[in-house]
Image: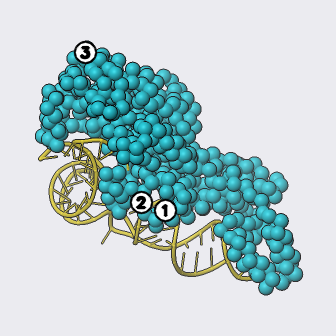
Chain colours: A cyan, B yellow
Amino acid sequence: MGIEIYNTLTRKKEPFVPIEEGKVKMYVCGPTVYNYIHIGNARPVIVYDTVRNYLEYKGFDVNYVSNFTDVDDKIIKTANELGEEVGELTERFIGAYFADIEALGCRHADEHPRVTEHIDDIIAFITVLIDKGYAYESEGDVYYRTRKFDGYGKLSHQSIDELKVGARIHPGEKKDDALDFTLWKSAKPGEISWDSPWGKGRPGWHIECSVMAREVLGDTIDIHAGGQDLTFPHHENEIAQSEAHNDKTFANYWMHNGYINIDNEKMSKSLGNFVLVNDIRKKVDPEVLRFFMLSVHYRNPINFSEELIESAANGLDRLRTAFRNVSHRLETTADNGDQTDIWLYKIGKARKAFEEAMDDDFNTANAISVLFDLARLSNTYLNEKNTERAVLEAFRGTLPELAGVLGLRLGDAQAEFPSEDIEALIEEREQARKNRDFARADEIRDELLDQGIVLEDTRQGVRWKRG
RNA sequence: GGCGGCAUAGCCAAGCGGUAAGGCCAGGGACUGCAACUCCCUUACCACCGGUUCGAGUCCGGUUGCCGCCUCCA
């Protein structure tokens, strides 16, 4: 069984077949950098980072590209308001973006192309569109002739006529048709601009992705992804531009993730009800945030609230504890178990279940439930009188490996050593317990608890953790 | 007006025709000197009404209620 991906283009799950065997070209629409990202912006970053991880887990060589939109109206407006150069502003928020996504356990893309570094390519691309009759210049602007492109609407499944009825589209005196959209926008005095055959100006929004995807990945890519709201018009327009220019299919698979809601309302910058990653990650363990987002299938909406985050935190703790439990046991156990095969078989079965879940359009919710099954299995095994290193090592290896595909670290890098006085107290308590001086033992335990240290007495000795 | 999505236990959430995964919370039990950790047990007439089928959260039709896109937006 291979991977199946829900393709917005066909509205069906389809077996994933890459253009080139063993390789995946993936383009994810990135942020417009004029502010910190909010958790709604973070969802696609986390989701597609996970998709990338899983594709790599399955042995694909993934070329993952995500752009920065580093010039547009909102950026110019914000820069003006702050009295800052456009370049300074975008540089600052690109840095903030990386800091945020790193905290969320997301890797950088293989390439992060920026609009301002591809102006020449964009101009050349637009020129071809004009030559082919798909675009026209009008008073310094260049527009795409939407009706000229036959497949327009195939992604969002809208017909051109229905779109016209929608009629919230601005007429625009310079356009031949209300449906036409901007490829090149002439500059107002004082605005950042580049020279072009049509005068000073800057690229429209949609053109950048068509151009950069092609420059970095080629005419046809395997997976193009982004938030649901990009389906129309952004991705629809990208298809129109790219396929008119390249005469080839632009992307084989289109993936779109659902929104994050707050109190069942869409979170968005325009509504003002957003939560910045930069703020929330100071209060909430960012790994919990990631776990929370992956606990729902990526195409479904997620409602965000403190209660749900807390519940997610407790769930993730369970996984971390299971990992700690098996790690701890491994430090003290010699080979003395039997029935090794049956346990190794169960672990293998869990791995299979994990893969089945992820193969099915990256069903991380089910994949996580497999992680919980594995955690319970592992804890159950630890309750056996005799344990075998081979089995313990299988648990100790499999649990973080699969969690790692989801970008969860299970805290294995956090090995922490107790300070000497803590160690002394723990030792003193052990003595007290041996002498059945439980009053003193409990006193010490409470004392440590005050310091945020929780003791756990296992068969293999005392263990502690931060509570 | 056009296109689309959703409605499953107190909460979250899988499920894609064969007698309802998983997590959180709660209650009970085991383990423990007591705890902690862990394990076991307990809780669903799947929004409503029709239909198809031997059999339907699961397919079809309808009703109700939410939500999204059609405008910058992840």
Give the distance between the C-alpha atoms of the residues marked 1 and 3, in whole angstroms: 52 Å
Q: Amino acid at mark 3?
A: Lys
Front in this rendered view, residue B50 or A4: A4
Q: Are marks 1 and 2 in contact (CB under 8 Å)?
A: yes
Residue A172 in view (yes/no): yes
Residue B39 as seen in the image, left or right of residue A281: right
Residue A298 as seen in the image, left or right of residue A238: right
Q: How far across and down, in percent of the image, does residue B30 sit? A: 68, 77
Q: How far across and down, in percent of the image, does residue A204 sit? A: 31, 31
Q: Classify 10 Å Cα crowding around label 2: few (below 14), some (14-19), many (20 and above).
A: many
Residues flagged by tags 3 and 2 on a common chain: yes
Q: How far across and down, in percent of the image, does residue A248 sit? A: 34, 20
Give the distance between the C-alpha atoms of the residues marked 1 and 2, in whole angstroms: 8 Å
- The image quadrant that residue A157 belongs to is top left
Front in this rendered view, residue A433 or A119: A119
Circle 1 sits on which residue?
A309
Measuring 83% from the left and 84% from the top, which residue is drawn there?
A437
Q: Residue furthest top?
A: A131
Chain of the residue on which disc 3 is drawn: A
Where residue A132 is drawn, which disc sits there? 3
Where residue A304 is drawn, which disc sits there? 2
